[in-house]
Image (spheres, helix red, strand yellow):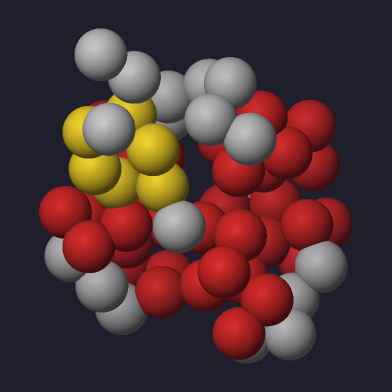
Amino acid sequence: MKMKNNIKELRKNKKLRQEDLAEELGVTRQTVIAIENNKYDPTLELAMKISAFFGKNVNDIFYLN
């Protein structure tokens, strides 16, 4: 079962570019693209960084399809 996420929507709501989010999270733009396209499931540490950045629960961002 593959995880899905709503990071793209959250990022766009904050008017951030993929580059901006990548810089905030300490990852590459390619990593952000892969996560947004559900091609890469982030580590638990990165998922927690993402949830903290957006001020949301991990479960509010990542979910099973």
Quadrant of the frame with the C terminus: top left
- Relative placement, left or right, of 44 versus 57 is right
The answer to which image quadrant residue 2 occupies is top left
Do we see residue 35 in this rendering? yes
Outermost residue on the top side: it is 1
- Relative placement, left or right, of 10 versus 13 is left
The answer to which image quadrant residue 63 occupies is top left
Q: Residue at x 68, y 76 (%)?
A: 12
Q: Residue at x 25, y 13 (%)?
A: 1
Q: Nearer the viewer, residue 65 or 52?
A: 65
Q: Nearer the viewer, residue 22 or 16?
A: 16
State the image coordinates of residue 60 (x, y, percent, origin top left): 22, 62
Outermost residue on the front side: it is 65
- Relative placement, left or right, of 2 versus 37 is left
State the image coordinates of residue 41 (x, y, percent, origin top left): 42, 24
State the image coordinates of residue 6 (x, y, percent, origin top left): 45, 57
29 relative to 10, above or below? above
Q: Nearer the viewer, residue 51 or 35?
A: 35
6 relative to 43, above or below? below
The answer to which image quadrant residue 15 occupies is bottom right
Q: In this figure, what is the number of numbered marks?
A: 0
Outermost residue on the bottom side: it is 14
Q: Residue at x 31, y 78 (%)?
A: 55
Do we see residue 28 in this rendering? no
